Amino acid sequence: GINAEYGEAVVSTQSTGTMRKKAPETAAVIMAVNDDDVFFHCLVPKKLSSGVGLRADEWLATFSGMLGAKCGGKDLYAQGSGKGAAQVDKALNLAKQYADSKMK
């Protein structure tokens, strides 16, 4: 499945570790907003990366530009931060569209 969510706290490495343990076969974009700052992590299980070509770094690239984000990562994990809390819903929609296109 594909999950996309955001909260009002900084996303920590611990939260991505929890996601990997509780739902290891789930690809996810996790966003957090603090004032105008946006923090995000993209997780992709190896099965989806190699199977359907869903890559965390490419997934992040679908919306990071609109947030003026600094980011990095590879096929299974990518992270970044930028500005533009008002753009989070639009960013999540772009992320969902990208994921949906890979899952067809």
Image: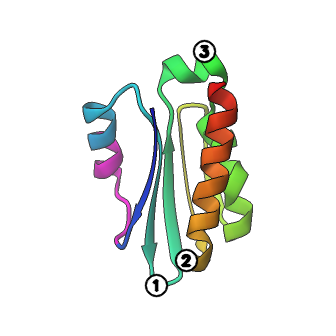
| Identity of the residue drawn at 49% across and 51% down | 41
Is residue 55 one of those drawn in magenta? no
Q: Name the residue under label 3.
A: 51
> Residue 36: where, in percent of width, then height?
53, 82
- Could you give the CA–CA distance between mark 2 and mark 1, rounded to whole angstroms? 7 Å
Residue 58 position by quadrant: top right
What amino acid does circle 1 point to?
A: Asp
- Residue 69 image label: none
Mark 2 Cα within 10 Å, few/some/many (few <14, many 20+)? some
Q: Mark 2 points at which residue?
A: 85
- Residue 35 image label: 1
Mark 1 Cα within 10 Å, few/some/many (few <14, many 20+)? few
**Up-down relation of residue 35 to residue 100 (above or below):** below
| Identity of the residue drawn at 30% across and 50% down | 15
> Residue 44: where, in percent of width, then height?
51, 32
Mark 2 vs 1, N-terminal side: 1
Residue positioned most to the front: 104
* Range of residues picked out in magenta: 9-17
Question: CB under 8 Å between callouts 2 and 1?
Answer: yes
